[in-house]
C-alpha cells in the first residue's frame, strides 16, 4: 500500500509542477483586483492556495456573474411569460374543455343507451302480454271446441245407449212373450197328454205367476 | 497544500468554480463573456428547448417532451396554489422562472467539465435578494403598515411580544442569507466532494472504490439538484404567502 | 515566527475538522424530520400527500444549518 503510494508519487509531482505555473498566472490575473490580503509566511503554498481559494468569495467576478445572471433571468422570464406559459396554459385549458365535452357526450350516450334499454324492455313486456293474450284466446277456443266435442260425444253415447237399451228391452220383451207362449203350449200339451182338458185361463195364470217369479 | 507533497495526491476541489473569461486570458470585467455567461446561456437554451420547442406541437395528446413541460407547469402551479393561495397565482410566471432557472442550472452543472452557476453565492444571493426585496415591497404595497403585524405575534402573552418581535425581525432578515447559502452550499458541497473522490482515483488500489463513490455521489447530486430547486421555489411560495396574508 | 505560521495552519485544519461535527447535528435533524413524517404518514396515509411540502421545508431548514457548518469548514480551509 505504502509502496504503491510512493510509486504514484512521481507522476503526481509532475502534475503539481505543471499546475504551479498555471496557478501563478491565475494569481497574477486575480491579483489586479483582489482585495483579500494573503496572511501567511509559506509564500509558495499560500499563493497556490489563495489563487484557488474560494472562487465564490472572489468579489472581482461578482459584477460579471450578477450582470449575466440578470440577463439570463430576464431572457427566461420573457421566454416563459410571453410564449411558453400562455401556450401551455392554453393547451391544458383546451384539453380540459375537450375532456369536459367528451364526458358530457359520454353521459349523453349513456342516457340514450338507457332510454333504448327502457324502450326495449317495454316492447318486450308488450310482446309478452300479447303472446299471453293469444295463448289465452287459443286456450279458450280449444276449450270450447273440446267441450263441444265432448258434449257431442256424450249426446251420441247417450243416444246409442238409449237405442241399445230399447233394443235390449224389445229383445227381452219378445223373449219373455216367446217363453210364455212356449210355456203355455207346453203346459197345455202336458195337461192334454195327462188326459185333462186344458183350461186356457188357468194355465195362463199359472204360467204368468211362475214367469213373474223367475224373472224377478 | 501540505498534504499534497507527502502523499502525492492533488486536491483542487475548488478549481471547477473559478470564473474565467471565455476568450483569452484577460481580467474578468462585468461585461466580459465568461464561463458563467456560457452556462447561463445554456440554461436559457434548455428552458427554451423544453418549454417553447417542446410544446410547439400544441398536441392534444402530448408527446413525451411536451408532457414533461406540462407536468412541470402543473407541479409549480399547484405548489403556488397550495402554499400561497389563489392570489399567489398572479406571480406564477416569476416563480416559474426561478424554478426553471435553478433546475436547469443545477442539472447542467452536473455535466462533467461544466461550470455550476448556482454554486456561486453571487448568483444565489441575487436570486434570494430578488425574492426578499420583491416579497417585502409586495407586502408593504398590499397591506401597508399592517404588514408589520407579521412580526407582532398577537397570540403570544403581551410581555413576550417585544422579545418575539425582535426574534421575528432577525429571522426575517436571515431569510435571504439562508435562502441563498442553502442552494449554493448544497451544490458546492456535492461538487467538491465528487472532486475529492476523483482525486483519490489517482491511487490504483483505491481507484475502483473511488469511482464507485463518484457514481453514488453523482446519483445523489441529481436528487439534490432537483430537491434544491423545489425547496427554493417552495420557500419563495411561503414568503409570498407571508406577504399576501401577514396575519400571524 | 516559523512556529506561529505552523500553529496557524494547524488551527485551520483542526477548526475545519471541528466545524464538520456540526454537520452531524444537521444529519440528526434531517433524519428526525423524515422519520417523524414517515411515522405520521403511516398513521394517517390519507393526509401524507398534502404534507410533503412541509416535509421538504422542514428538511431544508434543518439541512441549511449543516450547510452553514460545512461552509465554515470550507472558509477555514480555503479562504482564511
Image (cartoon, coloured by chain):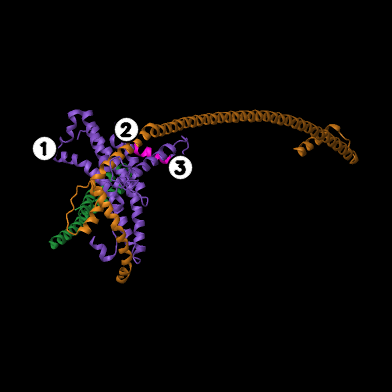
Chain colours: A orange, B purple, C green
A144 w.r.t. A27: above or below: above
Mark 1 vs mark 3, CA separation in Å: 55 Å
x, y (%) of residue B148?
17, 32
A28 lies left or right of B76: left
Residue A99 lies left or right of residue C37; in this view the side is right
Tell me if residue C23 can be seen.
no
**Judging from the image, what secondary structure is the residue with disc 3 in?**
helix
Q: Nearer the viewer, residue A40 or C34?
A: A40
Q: Secondary structure at mark 1?
A: helix
Q: Reading the chain from its start, which is encountered first: label 1 or label 3? A: 3
* Disc on the earlier residue, 1 or 2: 2
Q: Is residue A142 above or below residue B104?
A: above
CA distance for labels 1 and 2: 34 Å
Which residue is pictured at 31% across the width and 71% down the height? Answer: A3
Q: Which residue is denoted by mark 2 in the rendering?
A: B89
Which quadrant of the structure image shows residue B236? Answer: top left
Residue bounds of the magenta highlight: B67-78
Marking on residue B162: 1
Labels 1, 3: one chain: yes
Helix, strand or loop for the magenta stretch, by majority: helix
Percent of width and height locating residue B113? 36, 52
Image quadrant occupied by the N terminus of chain A:
bottom left
What's the mark number on residue B64? 3
Amino acid at each position: 500500500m505504502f509502496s504503491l503510494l510512493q510509486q504514484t508519487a512521481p507522476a503526481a509531482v509532475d502534475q503539481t509542477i505543471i499546475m504551479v505555473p498555471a496557478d501563478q498566472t491565475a494569481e497574477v490575473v486575480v491579483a489586479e483586483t483582489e482585495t483579500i490580503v494573503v496572511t501567511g509566511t509559506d509564500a509558495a503554498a499560500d499563493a497556490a492556495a489563495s489563487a484557488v481559494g474560494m472562487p465564490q468569495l472572489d468579489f472581482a467576478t461578482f459584477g460579471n456573474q450578477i450582470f449575466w445572471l440578470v440577463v439570463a433571468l430576464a431572457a427566461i422570464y420573457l421566454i416563459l411569460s410571453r410564449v411558453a406559459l400562455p401556450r401551455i396554459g392554453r393547451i391544458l385549458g383546451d384539453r380540459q374543455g375537450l375532456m369536459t365535452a367528451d364526458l358530457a357526450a359520454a353521459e349523453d350516450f349513456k342516457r340514450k343507451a338507457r332510454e333504448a334499454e327502457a324502450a326495449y324492455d317495454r316492447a318486450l313486456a308488450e310482446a309478452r302480454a300479447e303472446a299471453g293474450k293469444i295463448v289465452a284466446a287459443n286456450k279458450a277456443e280449444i276449450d270450447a271446441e273440446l267441450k263441444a266435442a265432448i258434449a257431442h260425444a256424450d249426446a251420441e253415447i247417450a243416444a246409442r245407449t238409449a237405442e241399445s237399451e230399447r233394443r235390449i228391452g224389445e229383445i227381452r220383451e219378445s223373449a219373455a212373450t216367446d217363453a210364455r207362449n212356449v210355456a203355455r203350449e207346453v203346459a197345455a200339451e202336458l195337461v192334454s197328454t195327462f188326459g185333462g182338458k186344458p183350461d186356457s185361463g188357468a194355465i195362463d195364470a199359472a204360467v204368468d205367476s211362475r214367469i213373474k217369479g223367475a224373472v224377478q | 497544500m501540505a498534504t499534497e507533497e507527502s502523499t502525492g495526491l492533488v486536491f483542487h476541489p475548488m478549481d471547477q468554480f473559478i470564473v474565467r473569461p471565455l476568450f483569452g486570458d484577460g481580467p474578468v470585467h462585468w461585461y466580459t463573456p465568461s464561463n458563467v455567461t456560457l452556462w447561463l446561456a445554456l440554461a436559457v437554451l434548455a428552458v427554451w428547448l423544453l418549454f417553447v420547442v417542446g410544446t410547439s406541437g400544441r398536441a392534444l395528446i402530448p408527446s413525451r417532451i411536451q408532457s414533461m413541460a406540462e407536468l412541470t407547469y402543473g407541479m409549480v402551479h399547484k405548489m403556488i396554489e397550495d402554499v400561497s393561495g389563489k392570489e399567489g397565482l398572479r406571480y406564477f410566471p416569476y416563480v416559474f422562472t426561478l424554478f426553471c432557472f435553478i433546475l436547469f442550472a443545477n442539472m447542467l452543472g452536473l455535466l462533467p467539465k461544466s461550470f455550476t452557476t448556482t454554486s456561486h453565492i453571487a448568483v444565489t444571493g441575487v436570486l434570494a435578494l430578488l425574492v426578499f426585496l420583491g416579497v417585502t415591497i409586495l407586502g408593504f404595497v398590499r397591506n401597508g403598515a399592517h404588514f408589520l403585524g407579521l412580526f407582532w405575534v398577537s397570540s403570544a402573552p403581551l410581555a413576550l411580544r417585544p422579545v418575539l418581535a425582535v426574534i421575528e425581525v432577525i429571522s426575517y432578515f436571515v431569510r435571504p442569507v439562508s435562502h441563498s447559502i442553502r442552494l449554493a452550499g448544497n451544490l458546492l458541497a456535492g461538487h467538491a466532494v465528487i472532486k475529492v473522490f476523483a482525486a483519490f482515483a489517482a491511487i490504483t488500489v483505491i481507484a475502483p472504490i473511488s469511482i464507485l463513490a463518484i457514481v453514488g455521489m453523482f446519483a445523489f447530486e441529481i436528487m439534490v439538484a432537483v430537491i434544491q430547486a423545489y425547496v427554493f421555489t417552495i420557500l419563495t411560495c411561503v414568503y409570498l404567502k407571508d406577504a399576501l396574508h401577514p396575519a400571524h | 515566527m516559523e512556529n506561529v505560521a505552523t500553529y496557524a495552519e494547524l488551527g485551520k485544519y483542526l477548526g475545519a475538522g471541528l466545524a464538520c461535527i456540526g454537520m452531524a447535528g444537521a444529519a440528526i435533524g434531517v433524519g428526525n424530520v423524515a422519520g417523524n413524517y414517515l411515522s405520521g404518514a403511516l398513521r394517517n396515509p390519507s393526509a401524507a400527500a398534502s404534507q410533503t411540502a412541509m416535509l421538504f421545508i422542514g428538511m431544508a431548514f434543518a439541512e441549511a444549518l449543516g450547510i452553514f457548518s460545512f461552509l465554515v469548514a470550507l472558509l477555514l480551509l480555503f479562504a482564511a
